[in-house]
Amino acid sequence: MDDYSKREKDIIRTGIQEALLCSEFAIKYLDQGPGRDQHLQQITNLVKNYCLLDHHLQARPNVIASMSANEAARLAQRENAENPGPVEDTIPDYSQIFSQKVKDATKNVTVENHAKFKDFHKKVQELVNKQDGTGDGDDVMYTEESENYLDPISKTELVDPVISTKCRHRFSRKSIMEHLRGKSFAQCPIMGCSAKFSAEDFEDDLVTAQTLRRRQLNKQI
Ligand SMILES: [Zn+2]
């Protein structure tokens, strides 16, 4: 991946993390109702834009390859032409054509199906249910919650949680870094998951970290 794409990937990742935090604060501090819904909708739209940008990033290499091939053919044609005319005439506005082609290549994508969007939506929904008390009985929630916040390697509560960008599985940073120690790539330790990742394929799970802090506080009260 080139530096430009890597930087944009970082922007998308951090942006969505921030959006999750914003949603969490909105759910926590705003009263249930149209005001809060509107706020959440705006944040959701922002996440959709990030996901669309991610689709554009994924489409770019193919567009670049096809444009380079077209360009090579065009130049070859010009070489062979008897009256090629001024070179400017054969050089169109590439940046405009490029962005149009990227848009065309992604016009049928559904951002709602993007893994990051689904993950965001699911978390926001969980937070809303928890806050508004529309979830199942408290006991059930608690059991599910405890399981969700266990590090699958150490089987203890998550500490400094990170998420694999390859398969969205969540671990304590220390556990997964130990799992990866001395290897450039390792298989995801979750049974049935075929993802392979490196230490760079993890992002901070700020929302879970925040939830864990809140759980800790609740236990102390
Ligand atoms: Zn996995």
Image (cartoon, grey):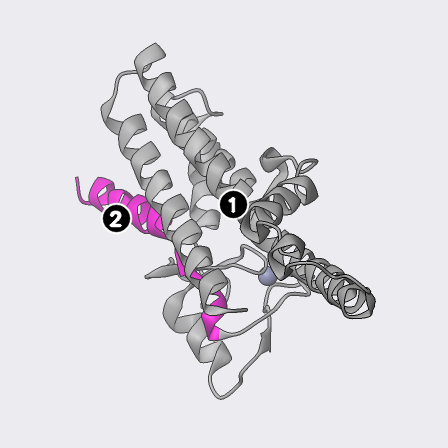
Q: Which residues are magenta?
A: 199-221
The extreme top residue here reads 34
Q: Is 24 drawn above or below residue 131 in the view shown?
A: below
| Magenta span dominant secondary structure | helix
Residue matched to label 1: 53
- Label 1 sits on what residue type? Leu
Left or right of 213, for residue 203? right
Label disc, if present, on residue 23 of the rendered structure: none
- Extreme residue in the front direction: 83
Q: Nearer the viewer, residue 175 or 5?
A: 5
**Which residue sits at x=28%, y=44%?**
215
Tell me the SS state at disc 2: helix
Ligand 1 is found in the corner quadrant, namely bottom right
Q: Which residue is mark 2?
A: 213
Looking at the picture, does residue 2 appear above or below residue 43? below
Q: Give amino acid for label 2.
A: Arg
**42 to the left or right of 52:** left
In depth, the one of 173 and 137 nearer the eye is 173
Q: Secondary structure at mark 1?
A: helix
Which quadrant would residue 30 be assigned to in this image?
Answer: top left
Residue at 48 percent across and 37 percent down: it is 49
> In the rendering, at what x and y percent does residue 39 appear?
33, 22
Are the two marked residues, 2 and 1, in contact with CB atoms closer than 8 angstroms?
no
Is 214 colored magenta in this rendering? yes
Along the line of sight, the residue nearer the viewer: 84 or 218? 84
Whole-percent x and y of residue 162? Answer: 41, 60
Q: Position of residue 159 (x, y in %)?
A: 33, 61
Q: Which residue is outermost to the left?
A: 221
Q: Is residue 200 above or below residue 83?
A: below
How packed mark 2 is, by other alpha carbons closer than 10 Å (few <14, some 14-19, many 20 or more), is: few
